[in-house]
Amino acid sequence: MPDWMTYFVDAAVLVPVMVLFVRMAGLRAFSKMSSYDFAVTVSFGSVLAATVVAPDTTLIQGILAMAALFSVQWIIGYFRSRSEMVEGWADNYPILLMRDGEVIEENLVRSRVTMGDLRAKLREANVMHFSEVRAVVLETTGDVSVLHGDDLEDRLLEGVTD
């Protein structure tokens, strides 16, 4: 069989296998990714590419490697949902960037968010005055949550590093 046909067959088999594994992982696979999820996703892509392009990597090896990655991801996800220690190891912690209209400069530096980034997120959230902001949180996914209004329940900030 010519090389190009092998590449095509490998890709035609592995892409549906990868989709099957992602579907088995559930809806969380389609949500915003934590750093752990991102690393596993990149690994899946790397296995797919290596299997399709590298002549020494067989289709069976690629499928087994994907199955191993999926299994590890599933096991860690299982323990992540049951243990704060595992969750802390696998994910970033959310960090508070603003509280009650005041920017927390130290956390901007720590999270490598610029003042320009922060102002852009405030504008996206239709904030008109810094004094309206109750809290700005850089979430574990990299999203920025802007909480504004009259009152903020403290339990919304549980687990957020300040």
Image (spheres, grey):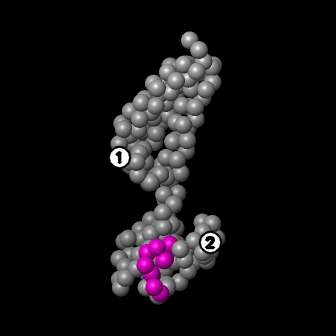
Secondary structure of the residue carrying numbered label 1: helix
Q: How busy is the neighbourhood of tag 2: few (under 14 within 10 Å), some, or many (20 plus)? A: few
- Residue 86 visible? The answer is yes
**Is 1 placed left or right of 14 in the picture?**
right
The alpha-carbon separation of the residues under discs 2 and 1 comes to 32 Å
Please provide percent x and percent y for residue 67: 46, 29
Contact flag, marks 2 and 1 (Cβ < 8 Å): no
Is residue 156 a member of the stretch shown in magenta?
no
**Is 28 placed left or right of 92 in the picture?**
left
Q: Earlier in the sequence, mark 2 or mark 1?
A: 1
Inspect the image, locate mark 1, and give the three-letter code of the amino acid beneath it.
Answer: Leu
Inspect the image, locate mark 2, and give the three-letter code of the amino acid beneath it.
Answer: Thr
* Front position in the image: 28 or 54: 54
In the image, residue 88 above or below residue 63: below
Please provide percent x and percent y for residue 2: 59, 14
Q: How many marks?
A: 2
> Residue drawn 54% across and 37% down?
45
Residue indicated by mark 2 = 114
> Residue drawn 40% across and 48% down?
30
Q: Where does the N terminus fall, quadrant-wise?
A: top right
Please provide percent x and percent y for residue 144: 48, 67
* Front position in the image: 48 or 74: 48
Q: How busy is the neighbourhood of tag 1: few (under 14 within 10 Å), some, or many (20 plus)? A: few
In the image, residue 16 above or below residue 103: above
> Residue drawn 35% across and 46% down?
27
> Residue drawn 35% across and 77% down?
153
Residue indicated by mark 1 = 27
Please provide percent x and percent y for residue 72: 47, 36
**Is 63 placed left or right of 78 in the picture?**
right
In the image, residue 52 above or below residue 19: above
- Residue 108 visible? The answer is no
Q: Which residues are magenta?
A: 121-129
